[in-house]
Image: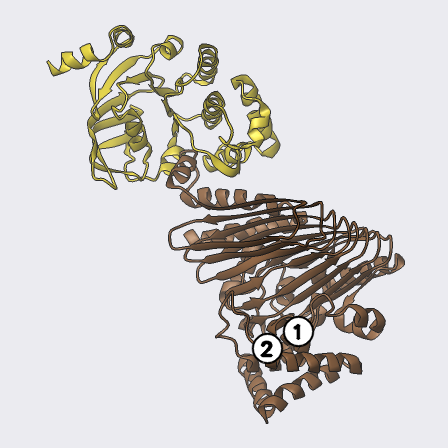
Amino acid sequence: MNRTTTRQTSSRSLSSSRDGSRGFSERVVREISEYKKEPRWMLEKRLKSLELYQSLDDPGFGVTTDSLNINTIVPYLRPEVQAARNWEDVPEEIRSTFDKLGIPEAERKALAGVGAQYDSEIVYQSIKRELESIGVVFLDMESAVREYPEIVKRYFMRAITPSDHKYAALHGAFWSGGSFVYVPEGVSVPLPLQAYFRMSMEGSGQFEHTLIIAEKGSSVEFVEGCSAPRFNEINLHVGMVELFVRDGARVKYSTIQNWSKNTLNLNSKRAIVGEDGTVEWVSGSLGSNKTMLYPASLLVGEGAKSEHLAITYAGKGQHMDTGAKVFHMAPGTSSVIDARSISINGGWAFYRGKLHIASNAKGSKANVKCTALMMDDNSRSDTVPVIEVKTRDADVGHEARIGRISDDQIYYLTTRGLSEDQAKALIVKGFAEPISKEFPLEYAVELNRLLNLELEGAIG
Amino acid sequence: MLLIVSGLRAQNRESGQEILNGVDLTVRKGEIHAIMGPNGSGKSTLANVIMGNPKYRVTGGDVLFQGESIVELTTDQRVKKGLFMTFQHPFEITGVRLRSLIMASLDAVGRRFGVSNSIKKIDEIADSSGLERRFLDRYVNVGFSGGEKKRSEVIQFGLLRPKVAILDEIDSGLDIDSLRKIADALKSLKEEDMSLILITHYQRLLDYLVPDYVHVYDSGRVIRTGGPELAMVVEKQGYSPVLEHVRG
C-alpha cells in the first residue's frame, strides 16, 4: 500500500511541475536549492549548469542513454519522498543478496535507502570529534556549503567544470549529497574515512558530490560506496568526485560500485595533483546496467604521481565502459594504470583509456596495462587505450591482453576436486586479486564474496 | 575391487574419433599398475576418460569405483570419491597461487585441517618433495621448470591422499637425480592401501615403484598384461615384439 502512495506522490509532483518545459527544470532546481537553504552563488551555479545541460550533446561514445528520462529524476531528489519508501519495495533479488552477504538489518535499510542507520550515525559522530581535534573536516556536502563556503566556492566543480560534458552539467544542476573532506597542511588522517558512515543523513545519493582537499604534505584515505547492492529506484546515478592533491600530499580513493542492475551509472572523477603529490585510485565496478567511468589524474606539479587500479565485472546484460585517464603536464611525473575486466554471460566490458604526456613533461614515466578475461564466447571485451606522447624524453610501457579461460584450465582444477563453478570462481578471484588486495581488508573480503555471488548466479 | 574398467569405449566429443576400443583394467587395494605403450597410443587419453574429462564421451563399457559406476559423474565428483590424476603437462593458471589451489582442493575433498595446520602440512610436504616453498606462493605452474611442475603434482597427490591415483608420465623430462627424488617422494607418500596407476615409458621409475602388473597399451586398448618382467622386455626390446606377439 505504501508503495502505491509513494508513487502517486511522485507523479503528482511531477505533473504539477511540468508547466512549461524549460521552466519546469529551472523551477525544480530552484526548489532544490531553496530546500537545501543554499546561498545564492550555489543556486546560480546550478542554474548555469542547467543551461549548459540543455545545450550540450550526449557524448558520442560509450553506452547508449536512450532509456534515460530526466523527468523521472526530479521527484526523488526530495528527501521526504525517499523516506516514504518501504523495505518491501526493495526488489527480492537485492534483499536476498543482503542475506547472503550477512549484512545487518539496520545497515541493509540504509543501503537500500529506506531507513536511517542509527549505529553508523553514532560511529560517525565519534569519528567526527576525533577528526576535528586534528583540524580535519569531514561533512556532508550540503553542510559544507553552509559551513565552509569559502573553501567550497574555491574548489567545487573546478576540477570538473559543468561545461566538461553533458552529464557534468546535469550533475552541476541537480547534485545532492556526497562528502566533503578537508585535510590541513601536514596532517595525516589516521584512519580511512568511509562515506558510508554518514549515508543515513543524505538518503541514497544519485547525484552525490565528493570533494576532497588535501593540503600540502597531508595524507588521507577515503572509501566510498559499498559492495552491497544499492537499490536505486530512479535508474540513474550521476556522481562526481573531485580530488585536490596539493604539493607533497597523498590521497587514496577507493570505491566499490554495486548499483542494482537497472541503473545507468555515469560518473566523473578527477584528481589534480601538485608537485610530488600522489593520487591512488582503486575501483571495483560490478553493478549497474551500464556504466561510464574513467577516473582522471591531472599531474600538474613536477614529480606528481598517479596510480589507477581498477577491476570491472560485466555480467549478463551489462555494458561496462570503464577506464582511466592520465595527463602528464609537468616534468618527472609518473603514472601506473592496471585495469582488469571480467566479462561473462553476454556481458560487455570496454576499456577506454587515455594517457597523455605533454611536451614539457620530460623525464616522465608511464605504464599502462589493461587485461580482459572472457569467461565464455557470448561475452565481449574491447580495449581502446589511447596513448599520446609529445616528448621524446619519456618512458612509456604498454600492455593490453584479452584472455579466455580455457576448458583445459577448468578441467585441470576439477581434477583437484573443485567443481566447475568453484574452478571458474578461483580463476576470476585470482585475476582480480592484485586489485582487490589494494582495498581496505573488509572491502577486499566483501569484493571476493561478491564475485563469488555473481559467479554463482552467472554460472550456476 | 577398487577400480574396474571393463570394455570401456570412448570417442572424442568434437571429432567423433574413437579413442578407446574396449579397455579392461582391474585395480585392487594397494596395487601398483604400470601402463606402458608407444607414443601416441592414447595412454593419457585413457587416464582422462577415467577422470571424466568432458572432451570425451563414453560410448560403451563401464568404470566402477568401489562397486559403483562413475561414468556419469563429473570430474570433481570422482575426485571427491578418491580418484586422482597427475598430469604429464600440468596447465598454467595465472592469478591462482599454488597454495590457494591446494587449500581450495583440500577443502573440496573434505580434508580440512584448519588454516594454520594446512599451511604447515603444505610446507612440510613441499620440503620433503623437494619443491622450494616460494613456489607455493607463485601462480600454478607459471614459470615452473619441468621438474618443479612434477613436484607440484606430487605434493598435491600427497595432500589429497586419493584411493587410486593415475600418475601420467610423472617421470618424463626429468634427469636421473630428479627422477630418484620424485620416486622417493612418491614412495614415502604412498600408503599401504593406496593404489597407483603409473603411465610411463621407462623402466627406471618402476625400479623404485615396483608394479604388481604391467600393461602394454596400444591403439586404445590393453594389448598384454604381465608382471614386472614384461616391463623388462619392453625396456630391452621395445614394443614391437610385444605387439607383434599379440598381432601374430
Left or right, residue A408 beside residue A394: left
Q: Nearer the viewer, residue A138 or A80?
A: A138
Q: Nearer the viewer, residue B226 or A252?
A: A252
For badge 1, the amino acid type reads Ser
What colour do you see for chain A? brown
Chain in yellow, by letter, is B
**Residue under the image location 28 percent in, 17 percent down:** B36
SS of the residue at dot 2? loop
Give yes or no for contact between labels 1 and 2 (Cβ–Cβ under 8 Å).
Answer: yes
Question: Could you say which disc has been placed on residue A56 in the image?
Answer: 2
Q: Which residue is mark 1?
A: A163
The picture quadrant where one finds residue B233 is top left
Q: Residues within 10 Å of mark 1 (few under 14, many from 20)?
A: some
Vertically, is A145 above or below A433? Answer: below
Q: Is residue B220 visible?
A: yes
Residue A277 place in picture, x, y as percent: 77, 51
Residue A3 place in picture, x, y as percent: 54, 79
Q: Nearer the viewer, residue A357 or B127?
A: A357
Left or right, residue A10 beside residue A184: left
Vertically, is B34 above or below A367? Answer: above
Residue A432 place in picture, x, y as percent: 55, 46
**Residue under the image location 41 percent in, 35 percent down:** A412
SS of the residue at dot 1? loop
